[in-house]
Image: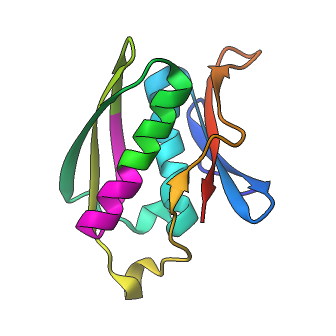
Amino acid sequence: MSRGKQGPARWEHFHHQADIGVRGIGPDLGTAFEQAALALTAVITDPSRVRPVEPVTISCAAPDPEYLLLDWLNALIYEMATRHLLFGRFEVHIDDHALRATAWGEPVDVGRHRPAVEVKGATFTELKVARSPAGEWVAQCVVDV
């Protein structure tokens, strides 16, 4: 299993057949969504290789946190594909069922970023947004690669 930094906010990958699970963990829902986005980037490249030079604002709304996670990750995938960017820094604010975020990134540089795969979309598989027994927020799903 791949992992981001250790501590209260972190991201992880988990294996799921031919696809990859992304999981964000944090002390609040916004941080868990930020970490899930970093896990998404880490499917493609090492997030530390991505310079946060170009901000992109993203907004979405959904009837519940699970759908909001799917909308968030799919919005990032759309922005990466249409703008030819990779994102390495995120700031997410969630109010009720609405998400407002800024993702910072840069244009893809194949030589420096060495992208491993293209993520096609976030799926309902293993979709979960909930508090863990330890009180941390966990936001996860499987992404189609």
Q: Residue at x 48, y 58 (%)?
A: 41
Q: What is the x, y in percent for residue 49?
A: 41, 69
Magenta stretch containing residue 88, yes or no? yes
Q: Which residues are magenta?
A: 76-91
The residue at the far top in this view is: 96
Whether residue 6 appears in this view of the structure is: no
Q: Residue at x 34, y 66 (%)?
A: 81
Instruction: Classify 94 as above or below 54.
Output: above
Name the side, left or right, on which 24 lies relative to 1: left
Q: What is the x, y in percent for residue 22?
A: 62, 48
Quadrant (top left, top right, bottom left, bottom right) of the N terminus: bottom right
Instruction: Classify 31 as above or below 63.
Output: below
Q: How is the image coloured?
A: rainbow
Quarter of the image for residue 138 reads top right
The residue at the far bottom in this view is: 111
Q: Residue at x 50, y 38 (%)?
A: 70
15, 89: nearer the viewer:
15
Name the side, left or right, on which 89 lies relative to 120: left
Quadrant (top left, top right, bottom left, bottom right) of the C terminus: bottom right
128, 37: nearer the viewer:
128
Whether residue 99 appears in this view of the structure is: yes
Name the side, left or right, on which 31 lies relative to 57: right
Quarter of the image for residue 58 reads top left
Instruction: Classify 16 as above or below 115.
Output: above
Q: What is the x, y in percent for residue 141?
A: 64, 42
Q: Residue at x 43, y 48 (%)?
A: 74
Instruction: Classify 69 as above or below 114.
Output: above
Name the side, left or right, on which 10 lies relative to 107: right
